[in-house]
Image: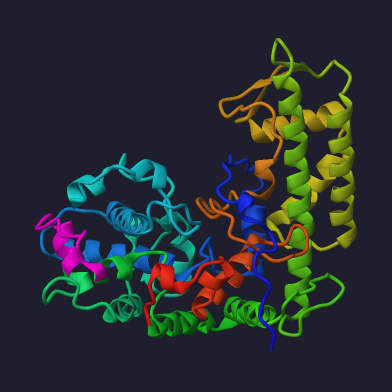
Amino acid sequence: MTGPVWGLLGPATLFSERRTRTLGLGAAVRTFNDLAVPGLGGVWFGKQLFLAILGVVVAEQARNAGRRIQNIETANAIEALACWLALNSNDWKPDPRLRGATKMQGKTDLSFANVRKSNFYIIQPMRMATVQPLLALALAEASSERFNAFHCTSHGLSFVNTACSDFNPCYYSKGILEHLVGWAKDEHNNVKSSNNLQKALSPLVPLSRSAREFLRERLVQNTGDKGQRRRAALAWVDDLHHISQPSITWETKPKTLEDDHWDDLHAGALFFTVRDAAISVLDRLEAHIAHQSAQRFSLDEPIPGPIASEMESLRRQAQVFLDKRHDPSPGELARAFCRECIDSSDANLIVNLVRRDDRVLRLRGRVVLPGAAFRGDQTQHPNAVSAPDEEGAETSDPLTIAWPVGISYRLNNLFLLNLDLHGKLDEWLGRSTTNTGDSQ
């Protein structure tokens, strides 16, 4: 058995800043992503789920003791504490599993009253990418997807206890959970000195073997089509991680996937390519406007060559999607968008795209003007890989393999999560577990 070749894309791809352009296609994006890997959300390593459900458990137990706190502020505070402890032990070096290095550096007051404040940590924590999987894996339950409405299930509590057990006690006779509940009740600020607490929370330290096995069981549970698709996708990425240089093409369907699953994946990739091409048109238009003294573009002017070229590419990609003749999106929303791109004149196509955007660019009569999120020349096309259906889903770009163009980002996330469940994510990210601690 050969091991994988690490780092097919280099570290220069990490930490790119993004703006989100949904283009009114959020329902289609959500559908294609959920058909690819149901219920995964934006999770790509196990500690994301652990920290989020730990926040729910701590908030519940603190409320039961009379403390008035909510799930969101508690989970955000625990995630911030986890990242602060990891960064402090790592000399504040950047890592795709950590957030808030710039925001938190120099901050030393780690009382819950201070860490819970919105200005202590970033505005898009990893918790935001865990909403769907916490429910899908039955770690939490709620009548809606509002995180503050979540209640921990017996599975969620078992996951927390399993993940904490190898690090108990963390402060004299107190276990991780008890110690954090006391912290959330403002009974103490003793969260810096415990090495066990740092390792239990740190995103750089893998979950214990028993916690990883527990989480894998949750991933393969559930009956019905969604559970079957998640199991099949997990089996596929598990096969891929044993191959040194996996060659993935649409001509060869993996044995673990059913035909309809593969067709949905392919159609989703074609649609995401169309969406990205549409964003490239808007990026070219933004760059053109940025170089005009008046910073405006009149639809009565000739279309500049670079913009026309991107529009031609958009129409080609839209036709490829239409030729596939497979659209599982609600009300065939994807097909309607592709038809709109092909059937519109140049001016009308720009009008339609700018109206769908209305954040980076805006339309006033026959003139396109900068919007609130206007930045000018976009040389790296940062929106082309964004996933506006799940907030915080792609704020980091871990090293990846050569997936087919446009394939749902959830496949790469599942590939990385599977590596994490095997205890091999550090190796993939080019690090030794001796530098981050070994949880086994």
Q: Is residue 431 left or right of residue 301?
A: left
Placement of the C terminus among the 4 image quadrants? bottom left
Q: Which residues are magenta?
A: 179-195
Q: Position of residue 189 (x, y in %)?
A: 14, 55
- Whether residue 430 is in magenta: the answer is no
Tell me if I can see residue 160 in this picture: yes
Q: Quadrant of residue 266?
A: bottom right
x 53%, y 60%: residue: 42
Q: Is residue 188 magenta?
A: yes
Q: Is residue 406 above or below residue 107?
A: below
Q: Work out whether residue 250 or residue 377 is closer to the camera in this orientation and state it.
A: 377
Residue 420, horizontal then vertical, whole percent: 51, 74
Where is residue 407 shown, x and y percent of the image? 72, 62
Compare residues 397 and 387 and report the one nearer the observer.
397
Residue at horizontal 23 percent and vertical 46 percent from the top: 108
Quarter of the image for residue 269 reads bottom right
Which residue occupies the foreground of this view, 64 or 290?
Answer: 290
Q: Please tell me which residue lies in front, 123 or 191.
A: 191
Q: Is residue 292 above or below residue 149?
A: above
Residue 208 position within the rendered picture, expressed as x and y whole percent measured from the top left:
38, 80
Quick one: quadrant of the N terminus? Answer: bottom right
Q: Residue visible at 47% across and 52% down?
A: 94
Specify how the rendered protein is coloured: rainbow
405 to 347, vertically: above or below = below
Residue 323 falls left or right of residue 90: right
- Say above or below: 88 vs 156: above
**Count of numbered circles in the view:** 0
Q: Quadrant of residue 174?
A: bottom left
Q: Is residue 135 visible?
A: no
Q: Is residue 16 left or right of residue 125?
A: right
